[in-house]
Image: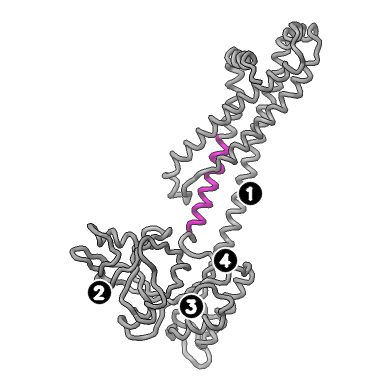
Amino acid sequence: MFDIDLWREIFQSINKNRTRSLLSGFTVAFAILLFTILFGISNGLQNTFKKIFVDDASNSIVVSSGRTTKANKGLQAGRLIQFKNEDFNFIKEEYGNKVEYITSRVFKNVRAIYKGEQSTYPLRAVHPDHQFIEKTKIKEGRYINQNDLEKQTKVVVIGKLVEEDLFVKTTALGKYVNLDGIAYKVIGVFTDAGGDNEERQIYMPITTAQHLYGNNDYVDQIRLTYNPEMNYNQALSFSTLLSKTMKDRFSVAKSDQRAIRVRNMAEGTKAISMMTGVLTFIVFFIGSGTLIAGITGISNIMVFIVKERTKEIGVRKALGASPKSIVSIILLESILVTAIAGYVGLLIGVGVLKWIGPHLKEYFITNPSVSVTLVFGATIVLILSGALAGYLPAKKASKIKPIVALRND
């Protein structure tokens, strides 16, 4: 049951010993403040690393072409390697069980005009699977589908910022936009976590682009995602096999690194995972050191507080107080001061992170924040440690005979 007299006595004790209480609270608050800031900055760095791949599937592989740098099988160096639809179909059929999604890409810049508004935007001609590889989210309408490919329809899906630029007083869905003199119907508007650059893109069916801009079956790049059930080593083996196969297909030397390039995002993902893991360990080590320092500080203070209150304990015992009540009042006072100080340290730490957060982007720290649960856990550790540190000497002091306690210097 709540004992109002007990709590009144605790608050009176804190008020009479302000210096002691402030010293105890400062130790806890400072430890939680440092703990919060350290983990907040660590999370900010991890957010930066993760943001690199936020708009792309983490299991994607990019197959690009260039010019050969070495002669091979009687073919001279300097040949331009040009992918075609048949190469896309070959990969899709040859490695069907290893491929989750696959698309070809053709890149082009176009001049887009809608009534009085106009601007230049990058165009990507793709297959329907591209939506899942690029993690494109449809805001309105739909994405390109198989029917668009087969009929070479003149349709486009535009980024949210393209809509804002061109369709100032209306919505883009269902309207016709002029791209380099050809009218296309806007069938969808998308958003992308990659930011402004991604949301200023225009997508159209790859067959439409090949027919209208070159009348050929050339593709600039092939992009795919491997089966997500593959582990890291299997994913790397697959990309190595894919590189070898494509080089053999185009008679490219094995050591030629520029003619055909296969980039597996799994490598970058693992590197980032290792980096964040090391960073988390370092911060956890430093944070644990901070907590240990706080625990040591509050423990020393509690021992001093109990020693300082030995005479008070003697008076209480002489007046009939039980050992249990003596221990309780000391522990409750310790827990109250530690809890309040920990909460204050948490508030200051979160406030500091919010204040300096926008200024840390230039140091590759994005949205530094910390889990409130983690900090509360650290505060509870300090509270329990302080309580344990106070309990032992308080228990010992509560067993001292009143006459001995009153004589204590």
Which residue does the numbered mark 4 point to in the structure image?
Answer: 267
Marks 2/3: CA–CA distance: 37 Å
Q: Secondary structure at mark 3?
A: loop
Marks 3/1: CA–CA distance: 38 Å
- Using the image, tell me which numbered label, if any, was put on residue 158: none
Residue found 44% across the figure and 77% down from its top? 104
- Using the image, tell me which numbered label, if any, was put on residue 183: 2
View extreme (front): residue: 1
The crowd level at tag 4 (other Cα within 10 Å; few <14, some 14-19, many 20+) is some
Where residue 39 sits in the image (x, y, percent)?
A: 56, 43
Residue found 28% across the figure and 73% down from its top? 184
In reply to whether residue 37 is colored magenta, the answer given is yes
Q: Which residues are magenta?
A: 33-52
- Using the image, tell me which numbered label, if any, was put on residue 281: 1
Which residue does the numbered mark 3 point to in the structure image?
Answer: 258
What amino acid is found at the position of numbered circle 2 in the picture? Ala
Nearest the eye: 331 or 131: 131
What amino acid is found at the position of numbered circle 4 in the picture? Glu
Q: Earlier in the sequence, mark 3 or mark 1?
A: 3
